[in-house]
Image (cartoon, rainbow, N blue to C red):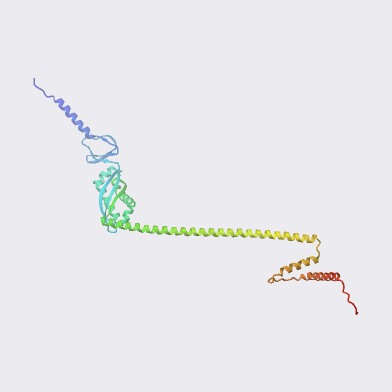
């Protein structure tokens, strides 16, 4: 029995293959953080969001698949010349992401290369306005300025630049050696200045301590003199009070004993005699002392009368 070829099976197989091809090409699954640009007959049609999408066979085609995640591009070292004519190289890392995938496809050709050229041009301009020392110490300012410039320039391309960072600034070897020597000199100078300032502070503290000690000693001496004077004053007051009380008691005794004016005058003269015993003392008698002198005359007469009464008269014999 001759073999017969079953064309129906062949057509089924061909149909299945064609369906699979169409399914693989015109049924698209868009992943998260991805956008797919679709063209219809060579013209932009739409951009597909994450999910399952069907295309019209033959009419629709995929123009580009765009990654919407943030990207970091590490550019190769770029040669620049600073304001003070020092040739150096700079390593830069740029971080950006796409905000409009349609613009990133249709507004610029080769987006990454365009961003690279723009970044290198901007960093050369910034470096040319700074000295090498300024470029080394003001990286943060350079990063901020570069980020702002590139972000504004790439905005029409649907790009958002988040930050730009300078990884390294690499001057020539002879410049590095000179900078090392300068750094050592600056450190030595700073050490000398710190030592001098430390000595100055020590001397100031020493002088301040001596000043405070002198003030405390003077204050102590003053307090001691004040206390001594107060003690002497209290002693004098005590002595004066005692003498006052003694004098009051003395005169009270005289008055209570009925002392006469003559007795008082006699005591007064005894006091004057005691005072005038020293040749260097001068005694001045007030005008009121005349009455006292009269009393003394009366006392003298009394003594004379008493003496004449006590002495018997001497009788003399009249011629023998």
* Position of residue 188 measured from the top left corner of the image (x, y, whole percent): 35, 58
Work out which residue is located at the far top of the displayed protein and give it.
1
Which sits in the foreground, 17 or 113?
113
Q: Quadrant of the N terminus?
A: top left
* Position of residue 269 measured from the top left corner of the image (x, y, whole percent): 76, 68
Work out which residue is located at the far left of the displayed protein and give it.
2
Residue drawn 75% across and 67% down? Answer: 270
Visible residue check, residue 127? yes
The quarter of the picture where residue 244 lies is bottom right
Question: Looking at the image, how many numbered discs can be counted on the residues?
Answer: 0
Work out which residue is located at the far bottom of the displayed protein and give it.
319
Residue drawn 43% across and 59% down? Answer: 200
Q: Quadrant of the C terminus?
A: bottom right
Residue drawn 54% across and 59% down? Answer: 217
* Position of residue 85 measured from the top left corner of the image (x, y, whole percent): 27, 58
Visible residue check, residue 122? no
Considering only vertical position in the picture, is 257 above or below 277?
Answer: above
Residue drawn 78% across and 65% down? Answer: 264
């Amino acid at each position: 029995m001759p073999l017969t070829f079953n064309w129906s099976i062949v057509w089924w197989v061909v149909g299945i293959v064609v369906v699979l091809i169409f399914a693989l090409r015109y049924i698209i699954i868009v992943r998260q953080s991805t956008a797919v640009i679709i063209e219809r007959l060579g013209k932009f049609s739409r951009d597909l969001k994450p999910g399952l999408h069907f295309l019209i066979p033959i009419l629709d085609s995929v123009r580009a698949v765009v990654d919407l995640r943030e990207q970091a591009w590490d550019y190769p070292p770029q040669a620049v010349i600073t304001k003070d004519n020092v040739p150096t190289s700079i390593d830069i890392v740029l971080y950006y992401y796409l905000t409009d995938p349609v613009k990133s496809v249709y507004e610029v050709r080769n987006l990454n290369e365009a961003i690279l050229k723009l970044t290198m041009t901007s960093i050369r301009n910034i470096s040319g306005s700074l000295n090498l020392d300024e470029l080394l110490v003001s990286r943060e300012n350079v990063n901020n300025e570069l980020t702002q410039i590139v972000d504004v320039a790439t905005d029409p391309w649907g790009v958002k630049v988040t930050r730009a960072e300078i990884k390294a600034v690499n001057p020539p070897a002879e410049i590095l050696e000179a900078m090392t020597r300068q750094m050592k000199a600056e450190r030595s100078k700073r050490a000398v200045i710190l030592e001098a300032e430390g000595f100055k502070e020590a001397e100031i503290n020493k002088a301040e301590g001596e000043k405070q000690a002198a003030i405390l000693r003077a204050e102590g001496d003053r307090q001691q003199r004040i206390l001594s004077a107060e003690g002497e004053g209290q002693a004098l007051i005590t002595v004066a009070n005692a003498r006052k009380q003694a004098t009051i008691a003395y005169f009270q005794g005289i008055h209570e004993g009925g002392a006469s004016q003559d007795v008082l005058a006699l005591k007064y003269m005894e006091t004057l005699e005691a005072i005038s015993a020293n040749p260097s003392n001068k005694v001045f008698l007030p005008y009121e002392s005349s009455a006292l002198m009269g009393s003394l005359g009366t006392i003298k007469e009394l003594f004379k009368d008493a003496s004449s009464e006590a002495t018997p008269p001497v009788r003399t014999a009249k011629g023998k």
